[in-house]
Structures are given as C-alpha cells and as structure tokens.
Amino acid sequence: MNPFQIIALLLSLTAAASYFNYRVLRLPSMIGLMLIALAASLLLILVSRLGLHLDAQVRPWLGQLDFSKALLGGALSFLLFAGSLHVDLKGLHEEKWPVAALATLGVLISTLLVAVLMALVFSRLGLKVPFRACLVFGALISPTDPVAVLSLLKQAGVPRALETRIAGESLFNDGVGVVLFVLSDQLYDGSNALDWPHIAILLLREAGGGLALGLALGGLGYYLLSRVDDYRVEVLLTLALVTGGYVLANSLDVSGLLAIVAAGITIGNPGRQFAMSEKTRRNLDTFWELIDEVLNAMLFVLIGLEVLVVEWQPAYMTAAMLAILVTLLARLVSVAITVELLRFCSDLGPHTIKILTWGGLRGGISVALVLSLVPGPERDLLLTATYATVVFSILAQGLTMPHLLRWSELSASAGAPLPGER
C-alpha cells in the first residue's frame, strides 16, 4: 500500500469508529475510539485462533505505518502546538514551580523507581532482563502524555489552577522524558557508559536549546502575524512555524517537542492578544481545534490497533499487569515527594496528590518510544508492559477521573480554586 492508501484506510476506520461511538457508546472520544479499535483487534486475534488468520493481513499494514515515526516524526508537533495555544501564560507563570518540579524532579524519581521495582518483578518471574532495559522502561513510561491528558482535561471540569499544573506538566515533561529515554537507550544498546557530564550537557542542549529555539520561533511568528491581517495567511504561517520549527529543532539536536510547546504558548498568549484580529483568532482556533480532533482520533484508533503487535506470552502478561501497579506506585511516590517539597513555598490543596497521580495518563508517546527500540525479546517484553499500562491508563483512569473529581469536591465550579488555595 502506498502512503495515500494507508492514510485513507486509517481515516476511514477512524470515521467509522467515531460514528459508532457517537451513536452507540457515547463515551469520551479518546476512550471510545481506542476501545472500539482495541475490541476490533482482539476480535481479529480471536478469529485467528479459530483458524481464520485475518490478523495476518492487518499486521503488515501496521508495519508499513511506522507508529513511532508517524507520531514522533511529525504528528506530535501538531498536537502539542494545538494544545499549547490554549495554555494561559499568566496561570502557567503562577504555577511555574509545581510545573517545573513535576516535569523534572518528578519524572526523574519515577524513572528510577520504576526501573528498580520492575527489575525486582522480572527477577521474581524468572525473566532475565538487564537493569539497563528496566531503566529504558522507566524513562519511556514515566512522562505523562500531553495528548491523552489534554483530551481528558477538556471534559473533566478541572479547576483552573489544577488544570494548569496537569497540562503544564504534561506539555513540558516529555522533553525531559525523551532525554532520559535517549540516555537509557544508549546504555541499553551499550553505545555509552554512564557519564554525568555527558548527561548534563545533553539535558542542557536538548531542554534548554529546545525552549530557547521555541521562544525565538514564537517571537518570529509574533512579528510576522502582527504584520498581516488575513486569517488565511496567518494560518499558513502557524503551519509553517510548526512543521519548519520541528524540523529545524531536530537538525540542531535540540528538543523539537519543547520548541513547539514554547512557540505555541508564545503565539497563544501575546500573539493572540496583540498580533491577531478577532476574525483571525476565531478562524485560527477553529483550524487548530479541527487538526487536534482529527489527529487525536486517528492516534487513539492506532493505539487500539497496536495490540496486534503485542506478544501474548503468559509470563509477559503477568509482568505487564504488575507493571501497571508499579507505574501507579512510582507516580504516587514521585508526585507526593514533589508536592510535599513544594508545600514550603506554595499551598497546593489537600487533594492535589490524588488528582495528579490518577490524572497522569500515559499514551501514544510511550508506545512510540518502545516501538523505536531495537527488535528483540527484551523489546517484546517492554512493549507488552508498556501497552498494558497505556491501555489501563486511558480506559480506567480516563473513565474514572471525573468521578474522582466529584468525590474530591473539585468539579463544583470549574473556575474555583482548590480547597486550601488562596
């Protein structure tokens, strides 16, 4: 199949799933679409066990559509820009310390804790997995997924301050998470020893360089938008900013994810306020909301279909179920440590740890990262554990998050502060 045929098939599947979810299931979009695709994939597997190997026709198609490259190689830049356009810069500045701490210290603590606990799990199950592979798993599963998180926040009725913390963390922690993943992957394939100066330089270059480039691109975009009053030209300028900026960041070996987030926040705040007319703001928002919805829908359908590449070995499935518990525990510990440290300088409210822990969804980024690993038995095991964690995160945590908010009495007023906040 050529690329156009693959995209056409994926769009058709997504449209059919969206229609069925709207008419029958009426679940939140990301959950309903992934559930439908997951059910279809499991049905194909069941039918294949009965002798009709229909899944053998789908797997080559999934192989042609490289999920890792499709997401990390471009689609994610559009999704991050669309999400960051609506981040309130003033609110983000007010929550800068919680966001920064969760996106850095929180991810680091979670990565190390997941690695240690999964090493114990694999050992108990008799699976010979080197610690460096456990470290890779910790790095790819610890960052919360901005696409899944932002989709959840649209419908959960989260108070403004908490929404800023969750959204800000998910947008920024991917840059840190990807750097940790790259470092862990280098250890995994034996290409590098643990070199702390090298780690510090890589973090500074990737994260700092990405943010600096993003601010520069956002400033350039602001200048160009302020010189034009035609929404069609301005939409094209934002498209060029996203695609060109992401490619430029990758060519400079800095974080394209952080660059796009910084550029999006710049365009969405001073750019929206001072460089756009009301007509441009309306049309730009409509365009990027449509891009966001379509790519989101396709992404969650793909996540559901990826179950066809998972290894269904009993030991792997046991490890995967335990990985869900380990990831939740690591998230709880990392959030609790970070929040308690911040209580000295910020009143974060009594329910913050619960909400941040359960609202830290994993998604397509984790799947894409694990699929980028070199093929082998360890990769198959990590893929199974990653996929199980992502599916549980989106279905269980995504569906129950509104109930948790109601239980915590946080959703009574979407604009109200958290209990204990001033």
Image (cartoon, helix red, strand yellow):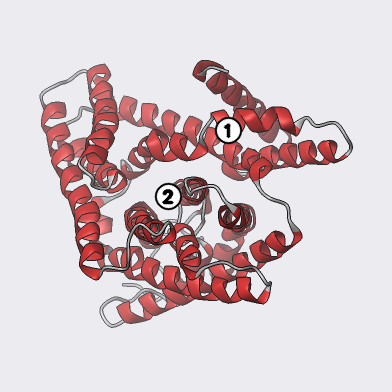
SS at mark 2 in the image: helix
The residue at which mark 1 appears reads as: 63
Within 10 Å of the Cα at label 1, are there few (<14), some (14-19), or many (20+) other Cα atoms?
few
In which quadrant of the rendered view does residue 81 lie?
top left
Q: Is residue 210 left or right of residue 42?
A: left
**Extreme residue in the right direction:** 50
Query: At which x and y percent is residue 84?
Result: 32, 44
Amino acid on which disc 1 is placed: Gly
Q: Which mark is residue 343?
A: none
| Image quadrant containing the C terminus | bottom left
Q: Residue at x 39, y 36 (%)?
A: 73
Q: Which mark is residue 146?
A: 2
SS at mark 1 in the image: helix
Tell me the CA gap for discs 1 and 2. Answer: 25 Å
Q: Nearer the viewer, residue 94 or 220?
A: 220
Query: At which x and y percent is residue 45?
Result: 78, 40
